[in-house]
Image: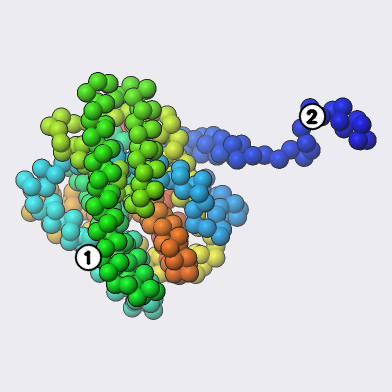
Amino acid sequence: MTGDSRSELFFLPSWPPVPDAVLWVSLTIVVAGLIGEFVFRSFRLPRVVGYAVVGTVVSAFGLGPSDTILKPSFRLIVDLALALLLFELGSRISLRWLRTNPWLLATSLLESALTFVAVYFTLTFLGAEARVATAVAAIAVAASPAVAMRVASEFEASGQVTERMILLTGLNTFYAVLATRFVFGWLHAQHAGIWLGAIAHPLYLFAGSAVVAALLAYSVSLIARRLDLRNENSALLLLGMILLALSLTKMANLSTLLVPLLAGVLLRNSSERPWIWPRHFGTAGGALVLMLFVITGSVWSFDALMAGAGLGLAVIAVRLLAKMLVTVALARPSGISFRQGVALGVALSPISGVALVIMADLQGLYPEFAAELTGIVFSAIAVLELIGPIAVQAALRYVDEDNIR
């Protein structure tokens, strides 16, 4: 085509057409939504399994992240989706329950401590460096709030195991964030020789996150006095407030995981009445959660699996064993049966979004050290992203708390 004819047809698109990010994101949402619905209707499995399958396929074709754990645009989606889920989870955690039943707190502390110790000694026994084993053990303490909230909501689960799963998942997230920040401080002290930062960093993180969380909780409680938070407009307002809180969190270099979790806990325990939200704060939140599972399912590679698959599987096994030993041993004292203790231990097995965010934070500070953990952590995420939701559903069904058949 000559230059003149090309200028005359300026309104035609270039050839071949170049798809933009919006096309890929929308296509991903459509495909993941369809597969999720197919998995749910055909096999009665959680829809998030279908979302994770899409992410796994994306990564298998080499379309997932390669040089960075989370690109900035992906990080925003993950942070906001996790913030919604953690805020919703925190608003269901009653601290009064811990006071009236101290064995719950004992269960949480012991299963987290045993998980850390078991993972650390297993990795060092298998030849991992002590600092690598320490970092992976701290990350392994966390359970998955995304899986816990999504599966419980999707299958309308209710009962002792469901509520304890939510409580212990929230506490595990808190422990894991603080533990990994101590690891970050230790790494900084080794590199810069400033040991004060090893202690000051976690303290600043907790205190600063608590302040921002208190501001968010107070703002939501003020709005709740005048608006019905269950309608669509209020849900969008809540979404905007949480996004604003995340922006302040990032500006202050605080934890995007602790702020929404603590805000939900403060809100729940400042009032006698329960807080009821639209599931994941409406359609926009549901799309974010869908993308969260797709992104989490895509951040692995064959190279990473080959480098750490054996150690990753070992972490999965000892982590599950440690959590189950404690939940079963303390089942009777805490007020549940042996059967419920087994189910609770299984329900705490998933690990995904929280581990991914911690790894992204670590890569931003110490990329070379983060690369040493990638094979182990991503192997665990790749496996548990697929079987974790199924394990939670099976655990809740085992104790008849799954209300959709």
The answer to which quarter of the image holds residue 163 is: top left
- Which residue is drawn at the image coordinates 79% and 29% (left, top)? 12
Amino acid marked by disc 1: Leu
Question: In the image, 335: left or right of 314?
Answer: left
Give yes or no for contact between labels 2 and 1 (Cβ–Cβ under 8 Å): no
Quarter of the picture containing the C terminus is: top left
Quarter of the picture containing the N terminus is: top right
Residue 139 vs residue 249, the one in the foreground: 249
Residue 248 vs residue 187, the one in the foreground: 248
Q: Which mark is residue 12?
A: 2
Query: Label 1 neighbourhood size at 10 Å, few (<14), some (14-19), many (20+)?
Result: many
Q: Which residue is mark 1?
A: 114
The answer to which quarter of the image holds residue 31 is: top right
- Which residue is drawn at the image coordinates 29% and 55% (left, top)? 205
**Vertical arrangement, residue 351 with respect to residue 211, above or below:** below
* Residue 69 in the image, given as x and y percentages of width and height: 49, 57
* Residue 216 in the image, given as x and y percentages of width and height: 28, 37
Question: In the image, 175: left or right of 139?
Answer: left
Judged from the image, the secondary structure of the residue bearing numbered disc 2 is loop
* Residue 56 in the image, given as x and y percentages of width and height: 51, 51
Of badges 2 and 1, nearer the viewer stands 2
User: Would residue 56 be seen by someone viewing this image from the given angle?
Assistant: no
Residue 190 vs residue 88, the one in the foreground: 190
Amino acid marked by disc 2: Leu
